[in-house]
Every structure is written in C-alpha cells, then in structure tokens.
Amino acid sequence: GAVVSQHPSWVICKSGTSVKIECRSLDFQATTMFWYRQFPKQSLMLMATSNEGSKATYEQGVEKDKFLINHASLTLSTLTVTSAHPEDSSFYICSVASGGLSSYEQYFGPGTRLTVT
Amino acid sequence: AQSVTQPDIHITVSEGASLELRCNYSYGATPYLFWYVQSPGQGLQLLLKYFSGDTLVQGIKGFEAEFKRSQSSFNLRKPSVHWSDAAEYFCAVGGNNNDMRFGAGTRLTVKP
C-alpha cells in the first residue's frame, strides 16, 4: 500500500495563531486525500476530502474558513488551522485514497497531535 | 449514508483467550468493510478488509473477520490474544466514492 507521512508529528501553538500540517504521499500519486480529526478516546471524524487541483469538500459542521485545505500536487495536501483555539486541540490524521482495483481503500498517515494553549 | 456501530466500548480478555469484537454496519449497497488497529498516539494500521468474494477474511497478526450480510455484521476474531494486541480497534465501512465512516472503536485490554 501507499506510504503516507505527516509533518509535524506534534505541535503546540498559542491561541489565535495558525498552524499548518502537511500530508505527503511518498510513493503514490494521490488525487484524493482525506483529513480526519480524532478527539481523545473517540473515533475518527471525517473533516474534508481534498482533491488535487480543486477545492476541498468539507463535511457538515466543519468550517472551511477555519480549516484551510490545499492539495496543490499529487503528493502533498496541507491543512491549516487558522486562529486556533484550545477546542481545536486534537489528533489530525490524513489518508490517501488508493486507485485502481482497490480504489475503496485508504492509507493513513501517522497523525499530528495539535495542542493549543 | 453509511454508518458503523461497535457495541462494545471496552473489552478485557486474558492473554491466550479468544477474542471477538463486534461490528454492525448500515449501508445501502455492497459495503467495503475494514478493521483497523490504533496504538496510543499512533496512526491506523489496516488489519484486514472485505470487498467481495469469500466472506471469511484473513488479516495480519492472526486476525480474521467474517462478513455476514444477513446480520449486517463484520466481527473481528482472534483465537488466542497476545499482550501486544492491547489497543483500540476500529471497524469502518466505505463505498465506491472513497468515503469511509468509522465506528466509535473498541478498546481492548489484555490481562496477563
């Protein structure tokens, strides 16, 4: 399967600042990437679907102006949390949609732990 | 829209005992079903998946799962649990639009 990396693995920022998280597909050209958020002891919640070269599709209840997604190339998608607040503290995980016969499978990155103080 | 239910929030088993984690799904068409495992602070690792064909699916680390359409279930099993299996387990259902929905997860504790 595809190898997916995320950077940084953890970040601490002050309230009101912005944080950018990178998701890279290291060995696979990904036209579609997904961003999930996971609060402690909870499941993964899909935030948005990121499509290369076009605007991301956000799930209901996710503020697109707060969580900016850019998928500028087939190997990189970024999530920027703007004007972060403590309630944005969470574990953010990206995934890559595979292509071909197993196009229904996703490969996940290791996650980014965001703490907003 | 698809959804997944994992009825058990937390399960404790003794090392060497058998394990079954339950998963029920709701999906209007043929579902694509997955089981993932997550260790604390880590990403997700795919244990196994079902797309079509044989309803008994073998995965990594000795896990298997059985798809039962009549019961809308995809339960995960392992005949003998190891202490290293302690983790959070997520069942997920996907469709042909690359969308994927996760269950709430089941936390597995293994007693020595």
Image (cartoon, helix red, strand yellow):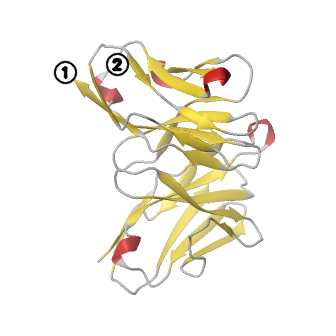
Determine which of the numbered discs, if any, sits on residue B81 in the image.
Answer: 2
Q: Is residue B76 left or right of residue B96?
A: left
Amino acid type indicated by mark 1: Pro
Q: Residue at x 70, y 35 (%)?
A: B31
Residue B17 x %, y %: 31, 13
Q: Is residue A26 visible?
A: no
Instruction: Say left or right for B15 vs B52.
Output: left
Q: Which residue is mark 1?
A: B112
Using the image, determine if residue A52 lies above or below residue A2: below
Give the crowd class for mark 2: few <14, some 14-19, many >=20 residues within 10 Å.
Answer: many
Q: Are marks 2 and 1 on the same chain?
A: yes
Q: Quadrant of residue B26?
A: top right
Residue found at the very far left of the displayed protein:
B112
* Quadrant housing the N terminus of chain A: top right
Question: What x and y, as percent, mark residue A44?
Answer: 49, 52
Q: What whole-number distance in Å separates the C-alpha atoms at marks 2 and 1? A: 10 Å
Q: Determine the image quadrant of residue B52.
A: top right
Residue at horizontal 32 percent and vertical 28 percent from the top: B84
> In the figure, is residue B75 to the left or right of A97?
left
What is the number of the mark on residue B46?
A: none
The x and y percentages for residue B106 are: 39, 37
Q: Secondary structure at mark 1?
A: loop
* Residue type highlighted by circle 2: Val
